[in-house]
Image: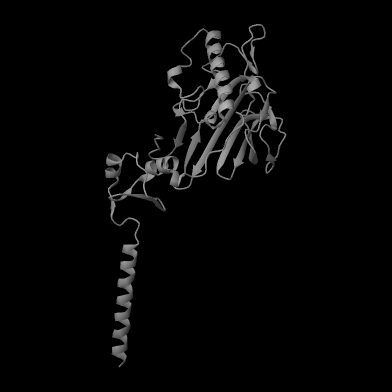
Amino acid sequence: MKHFVKLKLLFLLFIFGLFYILFVYFNSTNKDIKNPQTAFESLQYHTCPYTLKVSGKNISADWIGGAYIVGEEGYYWIINNCEKFIESSPPILSNLGIAPIDFEAFDPATLMAGAFRFEQPKDDRKPISSFGEVKEYNYNYSLSFDFLEPGTDVIAALDSEVRDISFDMISSNYTLILSYNDIYQIYYSGVLDLQVSEGEKVKAGQVLGKLGLNDEGALANFQIRISKENLINDSTLYYCPLQLLPSETKAEYESKLKLLMEEWENFIDNSMIYEELDYSIPGCINEFKLYRPGPGPVPL
């Protein structure tokens, strides 16, 4: 009798194990998912899928004809181009961290162009280092400004929260990180005389501090960087700040940045500093840049 009970228990365990294996198989995210190369070649991400599935680092999507592994590149394209899957929109900025009034026509008598002081550079520095340009063997993920007058107001680009303030020992200035919806981060560098503290809510246009001296103890340098981190692959998507401005404000800044570029080239007598054809908009070679994507997205 005991032998019969043991056999019955073993049989029940076998049946349970078989059902468990079948359950896992039929609910597997990778079952019947086709080779990723097929998706890249046949669809090229010009067609939005019906479903998008993320399981850990396994990313797949369903089109007519089956499911495909899309990987990180496909994932980024889908969430940025397919209405059904688009994530929260990037924030709308009201300024670039320094006001439009700080960009003015060059005055030869004072050597000033708004808040910019022109002087012959000792190296390859220039008033505007564009977002997306190659700089010291890497991309510039910020929109950077140099030759600024110390004491220039640094203002909040949008309604946000001061998430972090840290001191830079090299430049003796502060870096600030503003947070928007706990998703997007706005990074400022080169700030001194702080007028805000961590955790404080700030309004667009509010003065956060003043520009301090650069790492050479001379004129000020300022950077603004907009980013969104992705937890799937620890990558970070960076945005050209200009493209996040309202159309009228964007046009005003574009006009002023273009004039500043032209007047700087005239000042140092070199028309090759800013190659106009390289820019999607003045101050930005690209609209997006992805850091450590492996591979990165190609916005279409």
In percent of width and height, residue 259 lies at: 56, 15
Above or below, 148 against 164 in this view is above
Question: Where, quadrant-wise, is the N terminus in this rendering?
Answer: bottom left
**Residue 300 position by quadrant:** top left
Above or below, 175 against 233 in this view is above
Above or below, 284 against 74 in this view is above
Going 28% across and 55% down the picture, which residue do you hit? 32
Colour mode of the rendering: one colour
Q: How many marks?
A: 0
Q: In the image, 286: left or right of 252?
A: left
Above or below, 283 against 269 in this view is below
Q: In the image, 297: left or right of 119?
A: left
Going 53% across and 13% down the picture, which residue do you hit? 262
In the image, 160 versus 118, the foreground residue is 160
In percent of width and height, residue 176 lies at: 63, 36
In percent of width and height, residue 91 lies at: 56, 38
